[in-house]
Image (tube, rainbow, N blue to C red):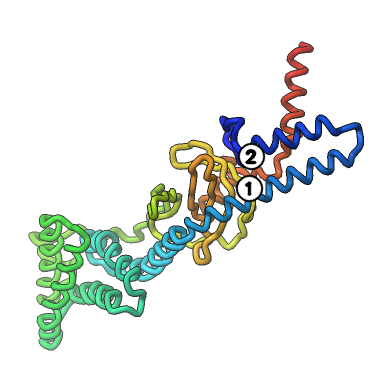
Amino acid sequence: LGMPVDVAARHPVCTRLFEIAGQLRSEFHGNAESLRTSLTQVDALISKRQEEIMAAAEAYLPMLHQLDRRGEASQFVRQFVDPLLTRAPVVAVRDFIDGPWRRILTRSYLQSGPEGGEWQADSHAIVDLLWTFEPKPTLEDRKALSAKLPSILRRLKSGMEIAGLAPTAQESFLDTFFTLQTNALRGQTAANTNPSEALEQVPAGLPRKPATPMAGEIEAGGRILRTLDFADGQPSSLRPLPCARGDWLRIRDDLNTEHTALFCAQSPHGQRALLLNPDSRFALAVHPVILERQLRDGSARVCSEESLFETAASQALALGQQRSA
């Protein structure tokens, strides 16, 4: 039933359980039919509670889909940006693409999708920027650079403003770009620049940072949906989760606090799970890879199939053993 440990006896679910138990006490005379009737009533109570929570979960679905859309955007941008990082001539350029411009591209994707004008302009701008750093040995190459450079820089400047970069950071990036473009006009690469103009090179075979789970939240309509996800749009696992819609789960949040919640929905693109328990005011959207990891290491578990009778019997047995000892 997913009730918190400190639930009040006057809670409607508890009241109904007391009614069923009281009726069984008064009417049970050793026949199985009374037990079957009571169990049917308990099953009906469980079904009703699940239906009510599933209905309450409908209000969180737009936020779940919003999170899915963000993940879709991050994954698309990662596939676009990662190959460009290998073309970055120096560390400053790589950091610019992997940081501010990755955020700009994510914003553009969310605004208009990969076919929209914003995405086209911002993605072409960063590809064109990398082209400006390549050596321009011929007069035609240098004329092409001079013609395209103003529009590229305008787009970059606009993007840096949108990304909220401080003026000093903008100046630092632009100084690096101008140095590399000047070297390109001289027919030089970053590796053979003058010592006075040398910039830190990108290390060969630089490993990608491992994906780290991040906690966050989305708020809409007075409701808060907590999130456990990845910042860079990790794809979902190909394996199905060892739990399903309608299961009660015990799961730990980013503060290592345990919560019990009903698995109410799964998002269509990223397969993120929506877990909800209105009684404890807990709503969580969790990436399937993170949930699978927690279920595997034991920090989360499916508790729907745990038998209340077996739990009570084990506690009673342990208590009896203590007394006899």
Residue to which mark 2 is pinned = 13
Picture layout, residue 144 above or below residue 5: below
Please give the name of the residue rendered at 75% of the width and 33% of the height, measured from the top-left corner.
Answer: 21
Residue to which mark 1 is pinned = 49
Q: Residue furthest bottom?
A: 140
* Image spot of residue 303 (x, y percent): 65, 42
Please give the name of the residue rendered at 64% of the width and 45% of the height, measured from the top-left corner.
Answer: 302
Please give the name of the residue rendered at 56% of the width and 30% of the height, measured from the top-left corner.
Answer: 6
Left or right of residue 179, residue 21 in this image? right
Q: Which of the 4 quarters of the picture holds residue 73? A: bottom left
* Image spot of residue 36 (x, y percent): 84, 43
- On-image quarter of the C terminus: top right
Left or right of residue 116, residue 294 in this image? right
Q: Crowdedness of circle 1 by 10 Å Cα count: few (<14), some, many (20+)?
A: some
Left or right of residue 132, residue 277 in this image? right
* For the residues bearing labels 2 and 1, Cβ distance under 8 angstroms: yes
User: Rounded to the nearest whole Å, what is the CA distance between mark 2 and mark 1?
Assistant: 8 Å
For the question of whether residue 256 can be seen, the reply is yes
Q: Nearer the viewer, residue 258 or 154?
A: 258
Specify the amino acid type for callout 2.
Val
